[in-house]
Image (spheres, coloured by chain):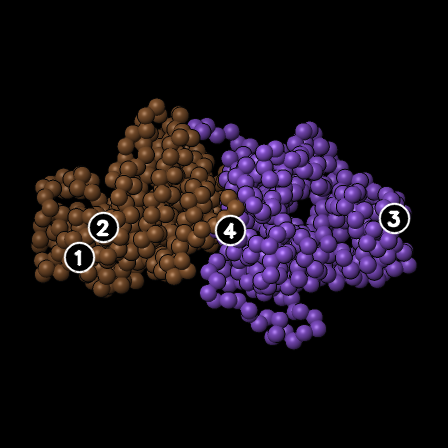
């Protein structure tokens, strides 16, 4: 390892770093609107709407027609390929509407999970073939950041060392290729909340996974200042009988990040996973009120947690579009506040929500 | 990696974390007075003093019996084995003198270099055998932290992947064993300044080394909040013809650290290597003024840079005790100020020494 061959020029580094900082500027987070056709099928079937390209276009139009109120709380939007080239009813490309609001445009670039043979149902993620050419095209077309999701799960024998290593490596290759093409890579090593494990176990696994991710990024010469991290919050498994407060989740999450994510990373944009809209906001808020020093921005990259109410209000009816858009704006503003630790809760039990249930002897 | 077996109890973690924070509180740093017998021989020969146990004892006595205000600048002292059991003229143990001043006592634990066959004269460090028992004894005898120095060099094919990996692994084993015995491990992966490489190259190597060190610490389940890092500053090689300002050294150093050292690490105490006393102070000051985010304390663990003038003032004569202590206290105070970014270069106009020679086009 005696010689260094600069992966990026000074100008390339500055461009990437500026893009990343714009996305996670104070009070802002990301709208993850990059549901694949298959994922959209699930969302639409829940509201009894047929999964056609037109319906997907109409639904995204509900989100993108939000007014200037979203400018202060949405720093970036992640698109699915199809949506990047769709237009609104007036023929204006969605991409342009978003850009005109000063919001950075992003694109999902992975091609889904594939099994790892010899493991207990574990996967890696594909999409590296021709990725450089695809990134170059997306950059030309207006995208400035990308997203790639890897998936790990906690069980008796997982995540295995192979799954951790392989997913970290593939994330690092993706990140390296993105940066070569002027695109900020969002690195997403999601550990699913499926299972009955407790908070401590999730924290332990999250620390191991993130350490492997950052070692891989270093090995692949990725410029950390021009990346973002999209991790799971540290939470118990869905089937865990123990309940934890937002403060406990916040402490476990921030502790895990402090032990693994170098300060050079400008922002951590949490995924919401299966959390409800309110849960996702309360947890993000608690994270931003956690007393431990936090050198990166801590904000959101939410899909369901920003869209659930909007989707439910829309239900496929044009007449409901305005009200649906309002629901989205409302969640966006709430999460903008949460990303600064300024969200007071939905009002039902504002005091109780802020009350710390932190257990002093849970040493993280 | 499915199961978690806590390496430390919450009480053990708290003890380690408290010790580490005490050492680097309020701008305090470390006096590295752990020169081995051989190394002390080099130092004493320069001032024409015979290298006897009594002479070594006398010099250390003078330093440790400096005024109590010493504890405002010195949070910890690293001792060599022999010194831990030495006493002052009245029969009082050095370690008790230091402890009564509120200074934490540390002990050098490594046992020197061993060659790595098949490399370009690279080495690893010995000392793991029986280390747990030695740590337990040192803890009983009053030590609260340990130090282990790994050495890497920049040259043709160096540092090799093997050297980096092997030294990182040994450091992690040492750190793990220390913590099991209540000692805070100071982790020292020194990239020595020998050579004609430039600042950029040292930064690149330092980043690779530190990334590997922190991956190894994570793999070995080391509790980062209960450790300290003792790295080299990022500097050009001694034989490099290009000269760099303290601001350039600072920017390269902090950039490397913030890309690799997790925020959970409470303090980074630089080694001074071959730097002059004044350069070591100026560089530390510039590091603390560097505009990048710095979530850890940035302090000193200096040997020569705290003792050079004191040694010269002593010259082996008891009558020079006060002059020796004055010289030492002056450097201790200067470095404490530098650790807070408040050092004013004596004898020159403040504005000239803080004038930035930072070259804007040198992207770190």
Circle 1 is placed at which residue position?
A94
Q: Nearer the viewer, mark 2 or mark 3?
A: 3
Picture residue at 21% right of the left edge, 47% below the top: A80
Give the camera-side residue of A14 and B318.
Answer: A14
State how far apart marks 1 and 3 are (Cα). 81 Å
Q: Pointers 3 and 4 in contact (CB under 8 A)?
A: no
Chain at numbered mark 2 = A
Badges 2 and 3, same chain: no
Q: Which quarter of the picture shows residue A205?
A: top left
Give residue B345's position: percent from left, percent from top.
67, 69
Chain B: give its colour: purple
Q: Nearer the viewer, mark 4 or mark 1?
A: 4
State how far apart marks 3 and 4 are (Cα). 42 Å
Badges 1 and 3, same chain: no
Give residue B318's position: percent from left, percent from top.
90, 55
Chain at numbered mark 4 = B
Circle 3 is placed at which residue position?
B50
State how far apart marks 4 and 2 are (Cα). 35 Å
Q: Is residue A239 visible?
A: no
Circle 4 is placed at which residue position?
B204
Give the camera-side residue of B342 and B204.
Answer: B204
Give the camera-side residue of A39 and A273.
Answer: A39
Q: Nearer the viewer, mark 4 or mark 2?
A: 4
State how far apart marks 1 and 2 are (Cα). 10 Å
Give residue A172's position: percent from left, percent from top.
38, 43
């Amino acid at each position: 390892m005696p010689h260094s061959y600069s992966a990026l020029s000074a100008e390339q580094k500055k461009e990437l770093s500026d893009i990343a900082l714009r996305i996670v500027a104070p009070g802002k987070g990301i709208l993850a609107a990059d549901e694949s056709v298959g994922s959209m099928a699930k969302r639409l079937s829940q509201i009894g709407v047929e999964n056609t390209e037109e319906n997907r276009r109409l639904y995204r139009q509900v989100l993108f027609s939000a007014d200037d109120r979203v400018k202060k709380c949405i720093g970036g939007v992640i698109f699915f390929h199809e949506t990047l080239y769709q237009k609104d009813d007036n023929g204006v490309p969605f991409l342009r509407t978003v850009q005109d609001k000063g919001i950075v445009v992003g694109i999902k670039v992975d091609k889904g999970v594939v099994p790892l043979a010899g493991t207990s149902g574990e996967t890696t993620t594909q999409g590296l073939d021709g990725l450089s050419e695809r990134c170059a095209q997306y950059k030309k077309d207006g995208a400035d950041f990308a997203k790639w999701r890897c998936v790990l799960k906690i069980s008796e024998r997982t995540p295995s060392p192979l799954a951790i290593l392989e997913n970290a490596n593939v994330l690092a290759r993706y990140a390296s290729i993105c940066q070569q093409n002027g695109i900020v890579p969002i690195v997403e090593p999601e550990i699913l909340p499926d299972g009955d494990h407790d908070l401590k176990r999730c924290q332990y696994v999250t620390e191991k996974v993130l350490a492997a991710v950052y070692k891989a990024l270093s090995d692949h010469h990725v410029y950390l200042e021009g990346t973002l991290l999209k991790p799971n919050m540290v939470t118990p498994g869905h089937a865990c009988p123990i309940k934890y407060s937002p403060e406990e989740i916040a402490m476990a999450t921030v502790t895990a990040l402090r032990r693994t994510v170098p300060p050079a990373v400008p922002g951590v944009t949490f995924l919401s996973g299966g959390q409800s809209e309110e849960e996702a906001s309360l947890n993000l808020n608690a994270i931003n009120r956690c007393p431990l020093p936090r050198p990166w921005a801590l904000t959101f990259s939410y899909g369901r947690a920003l869209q659930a109410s909007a989707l439910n209000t829309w239900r496929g009816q044009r007449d409901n579009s305005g009200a649906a858009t309002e629901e989205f704006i409302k969640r966006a503003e709430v999460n903008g506040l949460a990303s600064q630790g300024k969200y007071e809760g939905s009002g039902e039990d504002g005091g109780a929500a802020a009350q710390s249930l932190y257990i002093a002897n849970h040493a993280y | 990696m499915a199961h978690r077996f806590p390496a430390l109890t919450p009480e053990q973690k708290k003890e380690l974390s408290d010790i580490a924070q005490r050492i680097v509180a309020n701008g305090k740093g470390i006096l590295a007075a752990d020169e081995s017998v051989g190394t002390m021989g080099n130092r004493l020969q320069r001032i024409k003093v015979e290298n006897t146990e009594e002479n070594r004892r006398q010099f250390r006595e003078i330093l440790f019996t400096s005024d109590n205000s010493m504890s405002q600048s010195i949070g910890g002292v690293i001792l060599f084995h022999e010194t831990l059991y030495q006493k002052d003229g009245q029969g009082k143990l050095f370690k008790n003198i230091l402890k009564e001043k509120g200074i934490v006592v540390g002990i050098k634990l490594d046992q020197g270099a061993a060659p790595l066959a098949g490399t370009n004269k690279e080495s690893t460090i010995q000392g793991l055998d029986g280390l747990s028992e030695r740590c337990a004894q040192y803890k009983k005898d009053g030590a609260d932290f340990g130090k282990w120095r790994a050495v890497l060099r920049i040259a043709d094919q160096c540092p090799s992947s093997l050297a980096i990996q092997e030294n990182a692994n040994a450091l992690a084993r040492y750190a793990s064993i220390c913590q099991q015995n209540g000692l805070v491990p100071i982790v020292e992966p020194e990239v020595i300044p020998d050579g004609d490489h430039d600042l950029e190259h040292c930064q690149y190597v330092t980043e690779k080394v530190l990334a590997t060190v922190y991956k190894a610490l994570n793999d070995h389940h080391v509790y980062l909040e209960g450790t300290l890092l003792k790295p080299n500053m990022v500097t050009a090689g001694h034989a490099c013809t290009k000269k760099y300002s303290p601001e350039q050294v600072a920017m390269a150093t902090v950039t490397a650290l913030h890309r690799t050292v997790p925020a959970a690490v409470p303090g980074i105490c630089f080694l001074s290597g071959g730097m002059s006393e004044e350069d070591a102070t100026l560089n530390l000051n510039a590091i603390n003024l560097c505009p990048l985010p710095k979530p850890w304390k940035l302090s000193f663990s200096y040997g020569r840079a705290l003792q050079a003038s004191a040694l010269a003032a002593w010259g082996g004569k008891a009558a020079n005790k006060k002059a020796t202590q004055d010289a030492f206290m002056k450097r201790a105070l200067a470095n404490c100020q530098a650790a807070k970014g408040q050092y004013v270069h004596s004898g020159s106009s403040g504005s000239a020494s803080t004038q930035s020679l930072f070259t804007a086009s040198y992207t770190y």
